[in-house]
Amino acid sequence: MLLCQLALQVREDVPVEQLSTVLAVVLIVACWATALADVRRAPQIVATMERLGVPLRMLPLLGAAKVAGGLGLLLGQWNDTLRTVASLCLAVYFAGATAVHLRRKDAVQHIAPAGVLLVCSAVVFAVSL
């Protein structure tokens, strides 16, 4: 929770809701782009899944979860409850992704994207409460 509080105090002249909206857009784009890569079985994604020991049959499910999370954030711009639930679900998703990378002792450059998206999701969630 301390990390979320620090992230929200980045600049005092930027309203927290505005920061949250920018992070939500970043999340939407990241989720949909990586979901497309999952569905297309991009070589980099396949290599990552194999390195982490994640079965390739999981790719459509992982992609669908990211599409749903991104859609929830998009529609959540007009529905606070949906925004809260979507950001929480994405935070759980990226916490799981980060945990898998850490459990496999993956390199920092491979852990960082999931970790950054976890922080973004957590900030959007915290602001939406």
Image (spheres, rainbow, N blue to C red):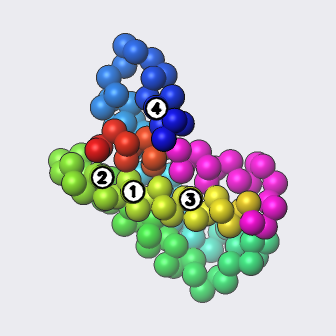
Sequence order check: which comes first, mark 4 or mark 2?
4
Sequence order check: which comes first, mark 1 or mark 3?
1
Circles 1 and 2, Cβ within 8 Å, touching? The answer is yes
* Callout 4 secondary element: helix
The residue pinned by badge 1 equals: 88
Circles 4 and 2, Cβ within 8 Å, touching? The answer is no
Image quarter hosting the C terminus: top left
Q: Report the disc number at residue 23.
A: none
Task: Reply above or below: 86 against 56.
Answer: above
**Which residue is at a point 49% across and 71% down the rendered structure image?**
63
Amino acid of disc 3? Ala
Q: Where is residue 56 in the image (x, y as percent from the top left)?
A: 65, 82
Q: Disc 4 vs disc 2: which is toward the camera? A: 4
Between 8 and 67, the residue placed more toward the observer is 8
The residue pinned by badge 4 equals: 5
* Residues in magenta, as a range: 103-119
Asked whether the viewer can see residue 99, the reply is yes
Q: Position of residue 38 (x, y in %)?
A: 57, 70
The residue pinned by badge 2 equals: 84
